[in-house]
């Protein structure tokens, strides 16, 4: 349990706290949830940098780091389906999030299965660069969505926002989330290809 691994565990601990802030509708809860999510995302940045700089990379870290990332991003996407982020712009947004969750979770199950087979061969496989890029896009999309929701709620208390403003926000969020989903599929396929020796039968 070196410092990078402690940061990763902190990210895991922050996940349920983030979900409570996201789902509990108190004033400015989207802002609070967003700040918690940003803090958790920063631990993902620093644990890797510290581990590489001070040569503190461990098998535990290789296991916990991608697990913590998946917990954080999956919690956000599922939470979006249950709160007004999924409902503000109609059922189409909820339908989109359902498909995104299905695709992303299928990818994660596939990658986890490969990791389990690799572990059976005595190897702990870390996330690849493509998986990291996928996570960056996911976190960017999630942070943007919550920031937009807070911004809309804040301004709506004083003025009536033009529909085009909301539309631009939806298009931006939708584009980011689909980019991250495409990255998830691509990174998953690359991950399986790079570790295909663990799923070949003798």
Image (spheres, helix red, strand yellow):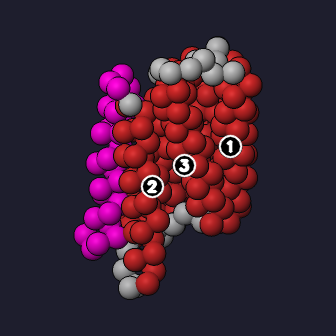
Checking the image for residue 73, the label placed there is: none
Q: Are marks 2 and 3 in contact (CB under 8 Å)?
A: yes
Dot 2 or dot 1, earlier in sequence: 2
Q: Main secondary structure of the magenta part?
A: helix
Element class at badge 1: helix
Q: Going 44% across and 51% down the picture, which residue do you hit?
A: 38
Q: Distance from label 2 to label 3 (Cα)?
A: 7 Å
Q: Which residue lies furthest to the left in this view?
A: 1
Residue at 72% across, 45% down: 179
- Give the labeled residue for mark 3: 139
- Residues in magenta, as a range: 1-27
Marks 2 and 1, how far apart in space?
17 Å
Q: Mark 2 points at which residue?
A: 41
Characterize the local packing of mark 2: few (<14), some (14-19) or many (20 or more) Cα atoms within 10 angstroms. many
Q: Where is residue 139 in the image (x, y as percent from the top left)?
A: 54, 49
Q: Disc 2 or 3, which lies upstream in sequence?
A: 2
Q: Nearer the viewer, residue 108 or 167?
A: 167
Q: Mark 1 points at which residue?
A: 176
Is residue 142 at least partly visible in the picture?
Answer: no
């Amino acid at each position: 349990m070196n410092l990078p691994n402690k940061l990763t565990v902190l990210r895991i601990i922050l996940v349920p706290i983030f979900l409570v802030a996201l789902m509990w509708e108190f004033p400015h809860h989207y802002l609070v949830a967003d700040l918690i999510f940003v803090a958790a995302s920063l631990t993902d940045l620093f644990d890797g940098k510290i581990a590489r700089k001070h040569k503190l990379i461990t098998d535990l870290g290789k296991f916990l780091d991608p697990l913590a990332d998946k917990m954080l991003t999956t919690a956000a996407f599922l939470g979006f389906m249950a709160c007004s982020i999924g409902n503000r712009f109609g059922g189409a947004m909820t339908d989109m999030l359902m498909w995104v969750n299905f695709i992303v979770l299928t990818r994660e199950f596939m990658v986890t299965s490969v990791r389990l087979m690799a572990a059976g061969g005595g190897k702990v496989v870390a996330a690849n660069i493509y998986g990291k890029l996928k996570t960056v896009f996911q976190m960017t999309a999630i942070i943007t969505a919550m920031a937009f929701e807070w911004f809309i709620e804040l301004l709506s208390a004083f003025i009536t926002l033009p529909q085009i403003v909301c539309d631009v926000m939806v298009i931006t969020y939708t584009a980011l989330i689909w980019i991250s989903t495409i990255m998830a599929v691509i990174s998953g396929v690359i991950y399986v290809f790079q570790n295909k020796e663990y799923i070949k039968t003798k």
